[in-house]
Image (spheres, coloured by chain):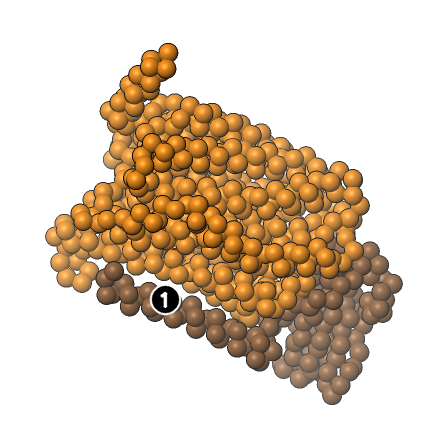
Amino acid sequence: MEAINANAASLKNKANEILGVNPEDAKLTKSFLLVSFVALLLGGLFGLLQGINRAGLLELPSWLNYYQVLTAHGLLLIVVFSGFFMIGYFYSGLSHTLGGLLPKVRKLGWIGYGLSMFGTVLVVIMVLMNEATVLFTFYPPMMAHPIFYFGLVFVVLGIWSCCIGAFIQVADWRKKHKGQHLPILSFFATGAFVLLLGCTLFVAVEVLFLILPWSLGWVDTINVMLARTLFWAFGHTAVNIWYLTAVSAWYVIVPRVIGGTLWNDTLTRVVVIALVIMNITGGFHHQIVDPGISDTIKYMHVFMSLAIGFPSLMTAYALFVVMERAGRRKGGKGALGWLKKLPWGDVRFLAPFIAMLAFAPAGAGGIAQTTFQLNAVVHNTMWVVGHFHLTLGMSVAMTFFGISYWLIPFISGRVLTPAMNKLGVIQTYIWAAAMVLMAFAMHTAGLFGSPRRTSYTTYGDHAAALGWDPYMLLIGFGAVLLTIGVLIQFYAVIHLMFFAPKGQTEFPIAPKEPGDVTGYWTERWGVWVVLLIIVVAMAYVVPIVDMIVNAPPGSPPIRPW
Amino acid sequence: MHKSEKVWLTISFGMIMLFMIATGYQAFALGMAPPGGVELIDPQKVNETAPFDQPGIKQIGDNEYEVVMTLQLFSFTPMELEVPAGATVHFKLTSKDVVHGFQIVGTNANGMIVPGYITDITQTFHEPGEYLVICNEYCGIGHQVMATTIKVY
């Protein structure tokens, strides 16, 4: 029996190698990506409503108020669109580079999908019923309906199921391939899932032990500061995981699309390891102007946040070297001649390339706003909104879009036609123009003091507030353009998934540069995880103990909407 | 590692260090740390706890004032303050309900007001004018009207 199973498995592997895709694994990824892009469509439409409200052109009705729309926009795009995409993409990467998912891993993937979907539906229903108008951050003592929090619990359980599946897959491969390097894309996936598990632990503690007992009325009050701190240990890491996912495509996929080779394999892995170890510890840079945390602890978090800038700067160098090398090998001459040799008409390159460019101002803005005193200048202003529309809205989203033009045909057994590619290029330019416009307006309005998370207001026609209006109009215009971009992107995804001509598409993974030898020491995941835990402990043990031991009397629940 | 990469990474590392030294020096040597404070208060008993039982403005020195202020859905107490130009104002702020923000538009005064804690923010008003004070953290359905002014004459 076992022999037959083994035989069947090896046959399946062979089929996988020939066809390039395991149909069952493809189905799993397809399901995740479909949810992701439906979330993009809905989240995008909510964004449109917000944009034109802030431009002063639309008053939202009481049954769908601005803050409801904002809650839905944030959760759908920051959590659902990005999270489902990341899991679908990396599961497909694991399947492709590690010889197909193990049956139990596939099962864990489906369980994760089911749990997350169920949780998402609960959350969305509560938000649409105006029972959870608490925004993406759901800061206590503002309290939503308990079902909203149960929904979050199911989302997290689903994520854990997917994380554990990924770990089992990787561990199994390593056991069967002693002494070999984990393929680079799976190396990225491992790092991303380690972080995903690490950061969701914090929010799970927040929701399970602090918020749920309180929202069910089992306890009267909640430790507001502790909840807030646990949230940000999760919140910032989450967006950095989406960024790490995008970075994996910059290092592994883009070089293949432009006909080049991988960057130095050891250094690439060092970047992944550095991002994994240092990522969770920067959470307090969201709390720099909070009371209750000492200046020295805040300063340590500023340091830890800025440290993440270093691997990103390594990335900036690496990517341009990879592009230059590929361009020169194709005959590009002179200082910038290699640029002309890059495939500008190929959406699989163009979209992630613009995403990389966006990360330059996005990262610089991030460094500026993390920096202690400068944070007070822009904290909770539109500047921050501009920042994460550059990081998430451009760097992450455009990379994900770029991936979708080959990954969806790959898993659907279809091909990207030249016409579809052209539509993708047009979409890319629309999206880029809209985001640049919007991010510029947001950053500027923020410097003039316009607050984030606030519906249209002139504060009784105060001169300062009226001065923001031209920028708000630009934001509204950007939101309209982005909606066109969302519609095109959604159309492209549906077309590539169900209607494009049948055929075979490559999963583009760049080959190594000849003679590039990877240091085996990079494979010590146990050490990296221990280092991660040590760094997190350095950052959080002292302040969290302080917040618990020296807590003020707690807060009762309040529903201010 | 290529030479140009070494140069690039050295510059990157130096830049981050420079940021750290600059902010650390400003925070700890020049006393320019961001707003904060570690004083606690019972958020359900703000009205009975000194000094918040008597919110208001008090002169404490030569053109130096202390403002004791509470934030609640969706207002500030006291509203519409007036101080002379050049005045340094020490704000002591706390929330009676949810998390609020305190931002004086056109200045760097910007901090979170978390129930259970007292936030300290100091601001010197050099220029005369009517400063807009807003809540910049979502606090509920009326968040966009939570504002007041400080008149500097």
The chain whose colour is orange is A
Quadrant of res A147? top right
Residue at 55% in and 67% down: A299
Give percent across and percent down for residue B104.
Answer: 64, 69
Secondary structure of the residue carrying tag 1 is helix
* Residue, far right: B48
The answer to whether residue B67 is visible is yes
Q: Amino acid at mark 1?
A: Ser
Q: State the residue in front, A136 or A307.
A: A307
Q: Position of residue B147 (x, y in %)?
A: 70, 63
Q: Is residue A72 above or below residue B52?
A: above
**Camera-side residue: A418 or A124?**
A124
Name the residue at the bottom extreme. Answer: B62
Q: Which residue carries the number 1 mark?
A: B12
Residue visible at 70% across and 77% down in the picture = B89
Q: Chain B: give its colour.
A: brown
Tell me the crowding category of disc 1: few under 14, some 14 to 19, or many 20 or more residues within 10 angstroms, Cα based. Answer: some
- Report the residue at 46% width, 71% height from top: B19
**Residue A36 appears left or right of A322:** right
